[in-house]
Image: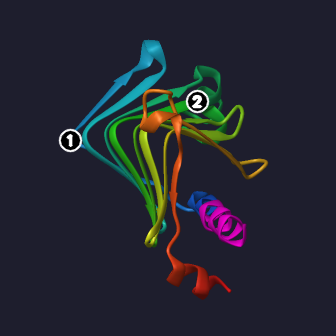
């Protein structure tokens, strides 16, 4: 039981992925803005960096509201973003913490991040594997699920004893 609680503590540290009040740098091979659709599309080796937090993927869609963008003289801020979607080999890192999946979505309306498709959360040698992880950034709660055809519907957790000893 202690191992399980310590692992949940380690995984909860993924809340460290939250970064505020720092400039955001986005690089990609292509950028397309669809004004009529209120959509910004980044494609090709997309990388988003804010302080020591990093996201890599192949495509990123940013959906925004027109009125909020106009109110801010065309500049997007967190209040004008409706959602952000990340596609294809999504990798989130911060220091030694790592999360990956096939698809991710940030929904600021509910203040949650969902990671889907062969999801792995890793902190050094300890890790969790599942099909879908939803992280509620307000309540700091994780919900991990697996499909019946994926690993017999079971979620996999591996805990490194050395890391537990260091956490004590």
Look at 58% across and 30% down and name the residue there: 69
Of residue 122 and residue 15, the one placed in the foreground of this image is: 122
Name the residue tied to disc 1.
Answer: 29
Of residue 20 and residue 59, the one placed in the foreground of this image is: 59
Q: Image height check: is 106 above or below 17?
A: above
**Can residue 98 be seen by looking at this rendering?**
yes
Q: What secondary structure is the stretch in magenta mostly built from?
A: helix
Look at 46% across and 62% down and name the residue there: 122
Q: Does the magenta-highlighted stretch encompass residue 6?
A: yes
Left or right, residue 79 beside residue 160:
right
Residue 112 at x, y percent in the picture: 65, 40
> What's the colour scheme?
rainbow
Q: Earlier in the sequence, mark 2 or mark 1?
A: 1
Q: Which residues are magenta?
A: 1-13
Left or right, residue 116 beside residue 72:
left
User: Where is the N terminus found, in terms of image quarters?
Assistant: bottom right
Q: Image height check: is 124 above or below 54?
A: below
Residue 75 at x, y percent in the picture: 53, 38
Look at 64% across and 28% down and name the residue there: 68
Name the residue tied to disc 2.
Answer: 69
Dividing the picture into quadrants, the one containing residue 167 is: bottom right
Q: How many marks?
A: 2
Q: Image height check: is 109 above or below 50?
A: above
């Amino acid at each position: 039981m202690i191992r399980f609680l310590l692992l949940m503590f380690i995984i909860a540290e993924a809340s460290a992925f939250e970064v505020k009040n720092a400039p955001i740098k986005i690089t990609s091979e292509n950028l397309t803005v669809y004004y009529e659709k209120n959509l910004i599309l980044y494609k090709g080796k997309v990388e988003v960096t804010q302080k020591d937090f990093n996201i890599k993927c192949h495509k990123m869609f940013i959906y925004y509201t027109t009125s909020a963008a106009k109110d801010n003289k065309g500049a997007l801020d967190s209040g004008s973003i409706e959602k952000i979607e990340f596609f294809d080999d999504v990798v989130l890192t911060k220091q030694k913490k790592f999360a990956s999946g096939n698809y991710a979505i940030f929904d600021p309306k509910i203040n949650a991040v969902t990671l889907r498709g062969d999801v792995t959360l890793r902190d050094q040698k300890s890790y969790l594997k599942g099909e879908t992880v939803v992280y509620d950034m307000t309540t700091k709660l994780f919900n991990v699920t697996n499909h019946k055809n994926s690993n017999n519907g079971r979620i996999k957790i591996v805990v490194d004893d050395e890391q537990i000893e260091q956490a004590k």
